[in-house]
Amino acid sequence: MTTSRRYSGKTADERRAERRLALLGAALEIWQEQGWAAVTMRGVCARANLTDRYFYESFANRDALLATAWEQVRDETLRMVLDAVAARIEQPALDQLRAAVDVVVHHVQEEPSRAQILFGDHAGSAVLEQLRRQTVQETTGLLIDLARPHLKPDVDGLEFRVNVLLGIGGFVEIMLAWRSGLLDADADTLVEHLTGVGTSLSRMFLKGDTNG
């Protein structure tokens, strides 16, 4: 098989995977430095020291590369959130919410260039706008599942989903505004305000295991 042949100790599949990672890494670097619009096939290939041929070996087109880069950062961010919640799985729901908000806000503060991939301006890119909308819906479903053990038994499912969706959508817009300098607040203050909003939105749905 072709994939079993080795060159410099690596199979064809291993070399292909390395080239894909190099292209993806180059795209993320350019995106963080200059924004998504600067991520072009030629620019990424030049940064990765690869030819056009190898670009199309891994990605159908530029949109496919943008989507893969965005999804990687999204998944890393969601993992941080889930880890923060898992560390407090025995604690009240609002403590878990605070932990989730805290880890994202401080990540945006500590890595602003990387945060722009998720919380930057995607206007002009249909694929990124679609991914953003899709992720808001998926994250809403995820938070509903995490909250389910803490909900009152008679909660109206639709009403709760509307409130969670409102909270997630608002959170994304607040991160956009904060990144852009439209909100003058440090990370800890912003966490307090966001947690307060989350508390207001969710208290009517939660059982008596909350604080305050």
Image (spheres, rainbow, N blue to C red):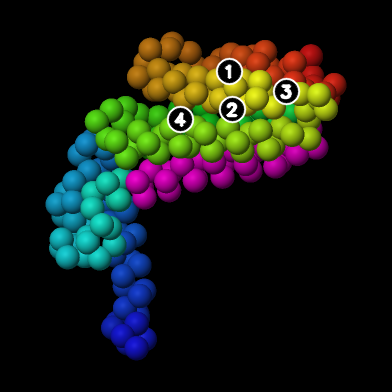
Q: Earlier in the sequence, mark 3 or mark 4?
A: 4
CA–CA distance between discs 3 and 4? Answer: 34 Å
Residue 100 included in the magenta stretch of the image: no
Q: Would you call the spot at circle 4 few (<14 residues within 10 Å), some (14-19), or many (20 or more)?
A: some
Q: Would you call the spot at circle 2 few (<14 residues within 10 Å), some (14-19), or many (20 or more)?
A: many
Q: Nearer the viewer, residue 159 or 210?
A: 159
Q: Is residue 139 left or right of residue 20?
A: right
Q: Earlier in the sequence, mark 2 or mark 4?
A: 2
Per the image, label 3 sits on a secondary structure element best described as loop
Q: Main secondary structure of the magenta part?
A: helix
Split into 4 quadrants, where in the image is the N terminus? bottom left
* Residue at position x 31%, y 73% in the image: 15
Q: Nearer the viewer, residue 160 or 50?
A: 160
Split into 4 quadrants, where in the image is the C terminus? top right
Residue 209 in sight here: yes
CA–CA distance between discs 1 and 4? Answer: 14 Å
Q: Are marks 3 and 2 in contact (CB under 8 Å)?
A: no
Q: Earlier in the sequence, mark 3 or mark 2?
A: 2
Q: Earlier in the sequence, mark 1 or mark 4?
A: 4
CA–CA distance between discs 1 and 2? Answer: 7 Å
* Residue at position x 74%, y 34% in the image: 148
